[in-house]
Image (tube, rainbow, N blue to C red):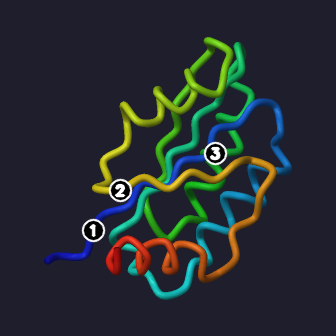
């Protein structure tokens, strides 16, 4: 079986510092091929407050970064908007107040493969 593509999704609402930390932690994932990844940032603010930051993060990223603006409040709306744009075989959610350890995604994929 080919290596699955993974869409990493970070919903955010007016937490730019947290978003930057969370996104950059996805850039540092060990044990996964960056060519199989994409990051989808969904900005759940009425005004597109995370757009400029996301564009800057895209310039640093080792894989594609997709920006989605979902002005309708609510994490379910944000996640659904991100899912509509995601192109991966699998989805991994990360909150904008979290930082993924370097082996986080490899461990998730290993568990999926095993079970």
Tell which circle, 1 or 3, labels the residue nearer the N-terminal end.
1
Compare residues 3 and 16 and report the one nearer the observer.
Answer: 3
Asked if residue 71 is positioned above or below residue 64 in the image, the reply reads: above
In this rendered view, identify the residue nearer to me: 13 or 108: 108
Q: Nearer the viewer, mark 1 or mark 3?
A: 1
Q: Secondary structure at mark 1?
A: loop
Mark sitting on residue 89: none
* Residue at 60% from the left image edge and 75% from the top image edge: 104
Residue at x-position 63% and y-position 45%? 54
Please indicate whether residue 85 sits to the left or right of residue 81 in the image: left
Horizontal side of residue 31 vs 104, given as left or right: left
Determine which residue is flagged by label 3: 54
Instruction: Tell me: residue 50, above or below residue 56.
Output: above
Q: Element at badge 3?
A: helix
| Image-quadrant location for residue 113 | bottom left
Q: Work out which residue is located at the far left of the displayed protein and give it.
A: 1
- Residue annotated with mark 2: 90
Q: Provide residue 14's location: percent of width, then percent of height.
A: 81, 31
Q: Nearer the viewer, mark 3 or mark 2?
A: 2
Task: Give the image location of residue 23, x and y in percent.
Answer: 66, 58
| Label 1 crowd bin: few (<14), some (14–19), many (20+), radius 10 Å | few
Q: CA distance from mark 3 to mark 2?
A: 22 Å
Q: Secondary structure at mark 2?
A: strand
Find the residue positioned furthest to the front.
Answer: 115
Identify the residue at the far bottom of this view. 31
């Amino acid at each position: 079986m080919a290596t699955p593509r993974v869409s990493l999704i970070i919903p955010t609402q007016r937490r730019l510092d947290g978003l930057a930390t969370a996104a950059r932690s996805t850039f540092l994932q060990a044990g996964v091929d960056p060519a199989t990844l994409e990051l989808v940032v969904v900005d759940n603010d009425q005004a597109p407050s995370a757009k400029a930051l996301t564009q800057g993060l895209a310039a640093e990223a080792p894989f594609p970064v997709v920006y989605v603006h979902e002005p309708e409040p609510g994490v379910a709306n944000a996640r659904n908007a991100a899912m509509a744009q995601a192109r991966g075989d699998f989805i991994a959610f990360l909150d904008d107040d979290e930082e993924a350890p370097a082996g986080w995604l490899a461990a998730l994929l290993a568990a999926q493969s095993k079970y």
